[in-house]
Image (tube, helix red, strand yellow):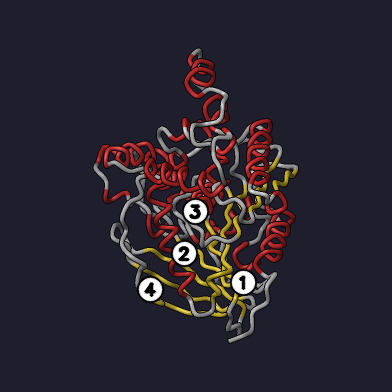
Amino acid sequence: MVGAYGPWLADQVLGSAPGRLSLRTGKWRSVEEWRRAARRRLLELLAPVDLGPAPKVTVTGRTVYDGLEIEFLTWQLAAGPPTEAVFLKPAGARGPLPGILALHDHAGNKFLGWRKIARTEENCWEIQRRHWDRYYEGLAWANEIAKRGYAVLVHDTFPFASRRVLVRDVAQPVKAGGVDPEPHDLEGIAKYNAFAAAHEHIMAKSLFSAGTTWPGVYLVEDQRALDVLCARPEVDASRVGCAGLSGGGMRTCFLGGLDDRVKVAVAVGFMTTWRDFLLDKCFTHTWMTYVPLLPKDLDFPEILALRAPAPTLVLNCRQDALFTLSEMERADRMMQEIFNRAKAGDHYRTNFYEGGHKFDRAMQADAFAFFDRFLKAEKRPSR
């Protein structure tokens, strides 16, 4: 990606040895000691923002659709517009239910957030249908797992949908033909998403200049959403998982690696190494991925592996154009080594599928079965 400088950056600057804080260096007396030190450094580099305490939630509407009771929620964080979210559970279920924080993808579509993976009515937006068909084999996967007996929360994260940057709010030279469209204006949505893509480097530079990082924002937003989910009376907060495709898989890596409330994590379509980003694939990825200086301390898979020995599943596709297969396989070996050292090799698995970037029905079935294995293993009495 950077011509003659690539081999120098990969071999001399990044190097091939484990990072300074990698468990694979062999210098740690225990996994717990390693986790404490590595998490401390990761949080230092992330520079998480302060978005306030667990938010006060307002229910703005309720409906029943496809056998699910659905609530429309909103809450206000310390910065930006209110967050919109949906909560889904099987109709009539009281709990305590295992909970899932479902993390929406990026997909170059910042106009949509929770609507990328949840469906609340038959007459949905055309932009939603197209998204489900392209990435999820026609399904809204948050609904599918809710129907299996889970309480599911899906929220917009920074800067998507209700949390997105509006064209009318930015300086004139940055607008670049973007518009703030209505939901059924497909041409306008395309223009907005083109604006949002071009705006990413501006947002990243602004975050760096403020002394934080992009993951340092969405990690905190996802943690506040986790507060909301765990506080629900229908949810057993001791049985909570998270999952997501692509940008949602990336968010799963950070949230699952840093928050022990996530008992089971499933990262879909987002697992490789810093070497892959450096040499081959950085042009395919969002600025939301990067944490300056971190590659010298931890490789990318080791962010998620910080949760070892907690159950962890990674789902990859062999022909996924966002990654290099050999580096996905190398990431798998890193993860397996760490879980083996944690004496929890059976709590970790990476599955490889044929095809491109997706979370299709077969992959969803495997993810849901993994959640069932670990979140439904211990039956709890009804309240």
Query: Disc 3, disc 2: CB below 8 Å?
Result: yes
- Identity of the amino acid at label 3? Leu
Q: Which residue has dot 3 on it? A: 255
Give the x, y percent position of residue 87: 51, 72
Numbered disc 4: secondary structure: strand
Q: Earlier in the sequence, mark 2 or mark 4?
A: 4
In the rendered structure, which disc, 4 or 3, sits on the residue that comes first in sequence? 4
Residue appearing at x 32%, y 62% in the figure: 77
Residue 374 seen in the figure: yes
Q: Name the residue type under label 1.
A: Tyr
- Sequence-wise, the earlier of marks 1 and 3 is 1
Instruction: Give the image location of residue 277, x and y in percent.
Output: 53, 31
Residue 281 in sight = no
Q: Which residue is mark 2?
A: 226
Position of 51 with respect to 300 (left or right) is left
Q: How far apart are labels 3 and 2 at the CA level?
A: 10 Å
Q: Residue 234 appears at what percent x and percent y?
A: 54, 79
Q: Earlier in the sequence, mark 3 or mark 2?
A: 2
Q: Is residue 313 left or right of residue 112?
A: right
Marks 4 and 3, Cα distance to the nearest angstrom?
21 Å
59 or 242, which is in the foreground?
242
> Residue type at mark 4?
Val
Measure the C-alpha gap from mark 2 to mark 4.
12 Å
In the rendered image, the quadrant that contains the C terminus is bottom right
The residue singled out by tag 4 in the image is 57
